[in-house]
Amino acid sequence: MGQALDVHRLHFAFTITFHYIFPQLTMGLALLLVYLKTKALRTGNDHYNRAARFWGRIFGINFALGVVTGIPMEFQFGTNWAVFSKAAGGVIGQTLAMEGVFSFFLESSFLGLFLFGEKKLGRLGHWCAGFLVFLGSWLSGYFIVATNAWMQHPMGYRLGPNGEIDLSSFWGLVLNKWALWQYAHTMLGAVQTGCFVMAAVGAFYLLTRRDEAYGRTFVRGGVLVGVVAAVLQLFPTGDAQGKMIAENQAVTLAAMEGLFTTQEGAPLAILGQPDVEKRRLDNPLEIPSMLSFLTYRKWAANVKGLDAFPQDQWPDRVEMLYYSYHIMVGLGTIFIALMVLAAILYWRKRLFESRWMLWTLMLCVPLPYIANTAGWITAELGRQPWLIYGLMRTAHGASPRVGAGNAWFTLIGFMGMYTVLGILWLFLVWREIEIGPEPGSKLRGETDIAPAAD
């Protein structure tokens, strides 16, 4: 069963990682679509309507790919994780069903109206359609995060006579304090992805001297929204998430920070390589006492290391957890510095002429995807060896009748299909960028009418 369990975990990790490429952009773009439509409604300038239509088409492509890759992922609960589904289905089925019945249908229905019903709806009606797409997208994200948060910090449940897990409090499930902060942190990560993608496309237009009015709008929107999201990602959401981990999963915090020994005035590791066998951090670059202060707001606070816990409670991939966490934090720090610098250049009216900054924004597109993926790897590895923290171990939740060979067969099949889908996605998005916000227009330089308010 051990080999099959590893394949089941790899199978789900692959499908969910690939799937999340698409929702993080749609959830980020949903907010930016409302931003563009609000500008159009307030100024009466059709420039913003055309910009919103352009990003609406890219949103639609990502939405379609997200649906295609998301449905098989949910079926894996029954195929690869049948024991878990049988035990906890009465709880997580609530939020997953609400995500499908309410959020998904709200988002998909009004996305159709947003893309094809602008003339029928009018200016205010089209703004409302965009807002409801945003609402559906962000509600969908909440129900998914609430499901994961319950697995991280179970609340509102009771154990049945045969070991089944029943829901005892609906509000305990959906208003789980872990879900509230995890959701805020996750959505800000999605907003950063949307901002970097929008700013990158704008930078591309400015550097190639085409559609320059739209390039300025895209860079401006991506930077101004992105700088707020980057700062809020650190504080308060990242800070609050870290405190919850310290309070409820102290062994996870120790592994994330590479803290092998319990210490008063524990240092914060900036760099270093964890050596699990020797239980130490090699070549560390540390800030003295900073981990104690960040965790408990006391410089001399005692922080539990991995030595305070039995080894069978340690996350089973301490090195991967440590590196994924530091990649997430490192990139998040870079995002703050980059967006603040870009905002200063905008304030000084030098952003659109700063070619080095435009190149930086354009080339940084992959980084928020990497950071969001590293964040989810941190969350999922940090929960190990528990599938439901404190209730069900991962080894006990897999399907006993699905062997490693069958799991490998389907995993390889998924890899092949998703490779084709990934190439199709890149082609479709690139085609939209090439067509531009004004399909068929030959006037794509400074002759475009730039919004006066900009």
Image (cartoon, grey):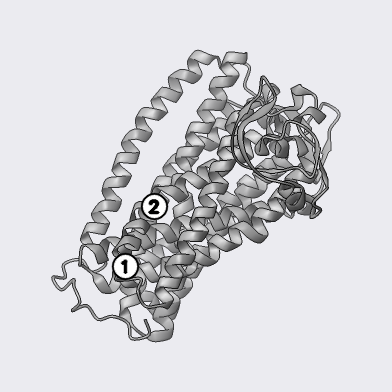
Q: Position of residue 362 (x, y in %)?
A: 34, 56
Residue visible at 84% across and 34% down in the picture? 159
In front here: 58 or 356?
Answer: 356
Q: Would you say residue 356 is visible in this rendering?
A: yes
Mark 1 touches mark 2? (CB < 8 Å): no
In front here: 228 or 376?
Answer: 228
**Residue that carries the numbered disc 1 in the rendered image:** 354
**Going by the image, does 170 lie left or right of 48?**
right
Quarter placement of the N terminus: top right
Is residue 185 placed above or below 413 in the rendered structure? Answer: below
Q: Position of residue 16 (x, y in %)?
A: 51, 38
- Helix, strand or loop at label 1? It is loop
Residue visible at 34% across and 34% down in the picture? 419
- Helix, strand or loop at label 2? It is loop
* Disc 2 packing (10 Å; few <14; some 14–19; many ≥20): some
Q: Type of residue at label 1?
A: Ser
**Residue that carries the numbered disc 2 in the rendered image:** 364
Q: Position of residue 407 (x, y in %)?
A: 50, 20
Q: Would you say residue 129 is visible in this rendering?
A: no
Residue 313, quarter of picture: top right
Residue visible at 71% across and 46% down in the picture? 288
Residue furthest to the right: 161
